[in-house]
Image: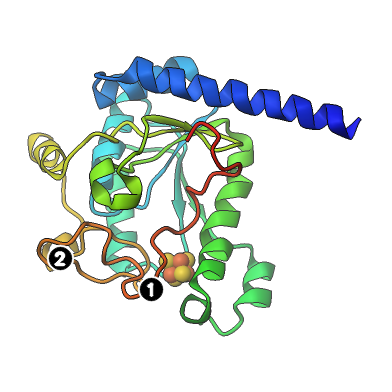
Amino acid sequence: MTVLIDVLKDQQRSVNGQRAVELSAQYEGWTAQDILRDAIRNQFFGQISLSSSFGADSAVLLHMIAQIDPNLPVIFLDTERHFFQTLQYRDELAKRLGLTNLINLRADADEAVNEDAKGTLWRTNPDACCDLRKVRPLAREMERYGAWISGRKRHQSATRAGLPVVEWDGRHFKVNPLAAWTADDIAAYFQNHDLPPHPLVEQGFLSIGCFTCTKPVAAGEDARSGRWAGAEKVECGIHTPIYAGDGI
Ligand code: SF4
């Protein structure tokens, strides 16, 4: 019986992985807005959400979502270590764009007490801290959905250079409508739609996470080089595939 279940799981993984590959090919050359519209209204209707950090580039996707479906679930991972400017920006932007379904996710209170009683886990074990405050809360919330939208872009770092438009991570589809966008595309969209910048951008923060783990970026460095600067860590873990190699 266990063998049969494993075979069925393998088949499902390969079916979904293949669907991600086909959708990526289908979306090649589409605008980000058209990709979003098709993903939200056709491919994953009623079972897709957006995960947003309300960081430097986030207003672009949030603005597009507001035009297509302002009631789409927008998930914000509230690690309780965000810059106050990010929390203010989140509230102001959601109000300005008319987003009506903002979901603020925090770590499970018991887990936080048990695993990070002193609040210093970010310093002693940042992987465990991200797992507690980002990966697990998001995984629990994502049990309600089959797909999610992310704002990742290929130009942001070497680790994102091969990012497809649609991925299968072993449990969910991930749609990356801005995968091919450049920093200039983002700047032009902000200007054309009169979107307010995150207040920390003018201080050199090009990718904005927790205040404990984010630094401004020096000229010429890639946008994410200020995240966990000086450590080997480059991603928080929410984008790590459940099954390596599945449609990624
Ligand atoms: S980015 Fe830093 S503070 Fe934020 S959850 Fe990860 S390790 Fe913790």
- Residue 204, which numbered label? 2
Where residue 190 appears, x then y in whole percent?
13, 41
Q: Quadrant of ligand 1?
A: bottom left
Tell me if 23 is positioned left or right of 222 in this view: right
What amino acid is at disc 1?
Answer: Ala
Foreground: 171 or 89? 171
Foreground: 102 or 39? 39
**Label 2: few (<14), some (14–19) or many (≥20) C-alpha neighbours in 10 Å:** some
Name the residue: 16% across, 49% down. Answer: 196
Give the residue pinned by disc 1. 231
User: Outermost residue toward the right?
Assistant: 1
Where residue 25 appears, x then y in whole percent?
37, 18
Name the residue: 36% across, 70% down. Answer: 228
User: Marks 1/2: CA distance?
Assistant: 19 Å
Q: Is residue 46 visible?
A: no
Image vertical order of residue 28 relative to residue 61, above or below: above
Image vertical order of residue 136 relative to residue 110, above or below: above
User: Outermost residue toward the bottom?
Assistant: 118
What amino acid is at disc 2?
Answer: Gly
Tell me if 74 is positioned left or right of 84 in this view: right
Name the residue: 82% across, 30% down. Answer: 5
Foreground: 205 or 12? 12
Badge nearest the viewer, 1 or 2: 1
Where residue 107 appears, x then y in whole percent?
58, 62
Q: Is mark 1 within 8 Å of ligand 1?
A: no
**Label 1: few (<14), some (14–19) or many (≥20) C-alpha neighbours in 10 Å:** few
